[in-house]
Amino acid sequence: MKIDKELYRKAYEAHRQWSEAKMLYRAQLESRLSPQEAWGRYVALWEFCAKLAPPQTELQHRQHWAEWDDYYAKIIKLEAWRRTRGQSA
């Protein structure tokens, strides 16, 4: 069975236009939300994703907190560097 290339192109273009219109419509709706409504939607999305996420293994848990410890140590180092640079300048 051969695919009708012209029909396929037309269907693809129609789908692309539909997707673009849908995306623009959603963007317009989002711009009408109050900050509280937008925040509520964000929190609801985060909670939904948190429920879907598989539980962390012990190794992942340790790695996660090791990354936070590393990040915090770098922030302390940066702040110390910033203070010394600010005092000498």
Image: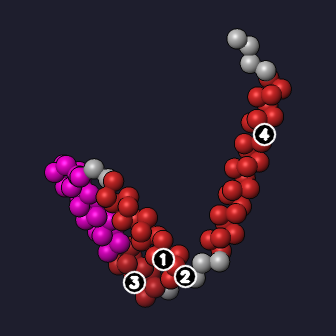
Q: Position of residue 59 (x, y in %)?
A: 18, 49
30 vs 79, left or right, is: right
Please name the residue shown 23% across and 61% down the image. 65
Q: Which residues are magenta?
A: 55-76
Residue bearing mark 2: 35
Please name the residue shown 33% across and 60% down the image. 50
Mark closest to the chain's N terminus, 1 or 4: 4
Q: CA distance from mark 1 to mark 2?
A: 6 Å
Q: Are marks 1 and 2 in contact (CB under 8 Å)?
A: yes
Q: Does the magenta portion include 73?
A: yes
Residue bearing mark 4: 13
- Is residue 1 shown above or below 47? above
Q: Nearer the viewer, mark 3 or mark 4?
A: 4
82 vs 14, left or right, is: left
* Mark number displayed over residue 83: 3
Residue bearing mark 1: 39
Q: Which amino acid, mark 2?
A: Pro
